[in-house]
Amino acid sequence: MKLAGAAGAWLTAGGLLAACGGTAGSSNPPATASSKPAGSSPAGATAGSKTEAASPAPSQAAAAAGASAPPAPKSWDELLAAAKAEGKVVVTGAPDPNTRQNLPAAFKQRFGIDLEYLPDATAVTARLQGERAAGQYNLDAEINGSDSVYVTLYANGWLDPFKSALLLPEAADASKWKPGGPWFRDPKGDTVLQLFATASPNVTLNADVVKPTDIPTGDSLLDPKWKGKICAFDPSVNGAGLAIGSALYVAKGEDYVSKLYKGQNVVLTRDYKQLADWIAHGNYPIGLAVPQNYLDDYVKAGLKFAQPELPDAPDGTNGGFGLLVVLNRAPHPNAARVFANWMASPEGMTIYSKTQFQVPVRSDIDPNWLPPRVIPKPGVKYLDTYDYEFQTKQRTNIRQFYEKLLK
């Protein structure tokens, strides 16, 4: 194993290469191979996973320190009027330029409320501890990945539940959500709303160098002829690499991933752009955990990539920057709730999906801008990497395994 490249940004605009495709029509999210959280969940059976670590529930001290927002107005019209009186909402989310440009403009046009967008949610979240300790409460809402939301925001008790504040009819209509209602993933089922569920192909190939028939199974990646020809985003840190590394670990076990990452001299990076460059230029024609948005320029230039489905190593599903939360002690609590309603609606979720290359979990959105490969298929058991129990228990153990293996 080799490590190359500078530390890169979190998975942006679209999860793993399979840029999280969208499910067309009204098909339900597929069954997953992780434990089932409280609240709404996608249709299909789940296979529970046994782990030893404890879930990081919000501490009593942290919960006591965060004062809840005033009670939400009882109707959408009242909520919108209160939000307009506040005049502004401060949100942090994905770092890509399309989101920074498109979300504020569309929100302002729809509601006449300014949206101040802070583009690096991971960095913003890391600063919150110090800011809150100093009595500074500047953030209203956040759209982030599972690590920041579950392990930092939720565990510290910095969030307000907002399920009861989903008052916009088009957002709250349970029949328009594939899981049977707004998909809250936290144990209480009212605080962390997941917007996307995208299949993340484990493997990406430079199709001019390696043909899909050359990699028919996960086991074929262990062929000696591929030694030194595989690159990956580092699975020992949070992000796309760990998501794919987890899917391979759960499907194939420790011995397999040890032979793959270590035995095949997989070259690692923490820079998504570098990963895409390596595959596109053929330096390492086989890639693991490659975000779609970083390949798009190469695709437009005529390069061909392939993402074979491995029957012995099924893809996982992820939500990218798709967990929506409302901060407690927010300076603009009603505007935050209006923003949450809009993001849960067809309009907001569609705009955001297009910037993120992710599959919406609403059944009334046809994401025809996404490649079919990243759309979860009914009846397939994927590893749900955004499941709360998996994220807060098993995933931590898997990351620690990779840390030890690859150091």
Image (cartoon, helix red, strand yellow):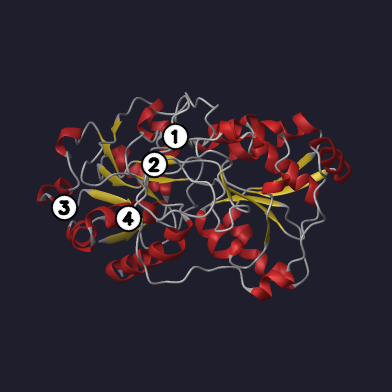
Q: If the image is split into quadrants, where does the N terminus sit?
A: bottom left
Give the spatial CA distance, label 4 vs label 2. 24 Å
In the rendered image, the vertical position of residue 159 relative to residue 323, given as above or below? below
Q: Which one is earlier in the sequence, the residue at label 3 or at label 1? A: 1
* Mark in front: 3 vs 1: 1
Identify residue type, mark 2.
Gly
Return the residue at label 1: 28
- Label 2 near label 1: C-beta < 8 Å? yes
Return the residue at label 4: 245
Return the residue at label 3: 227
* Mark in front: 4 vs 2: 2
Identify residue type, mark 3.
Lys
Q: Which mark is residue 44?
A: 2
Mark 3 residue crowding within 10 angstroms, few (<14) / some (14–19) / many (20+): some
Residue 133 visible in this rendered orientation of the protein: yes
Q: Residue at x 64, y 40 (%)?
A: 100
Q: Which mark is residue 112?
A: none
Where residue 392 sits: x, y (%)? 46, 63
Give the spatial CA distance, label 4 vs label 1. 25 Å
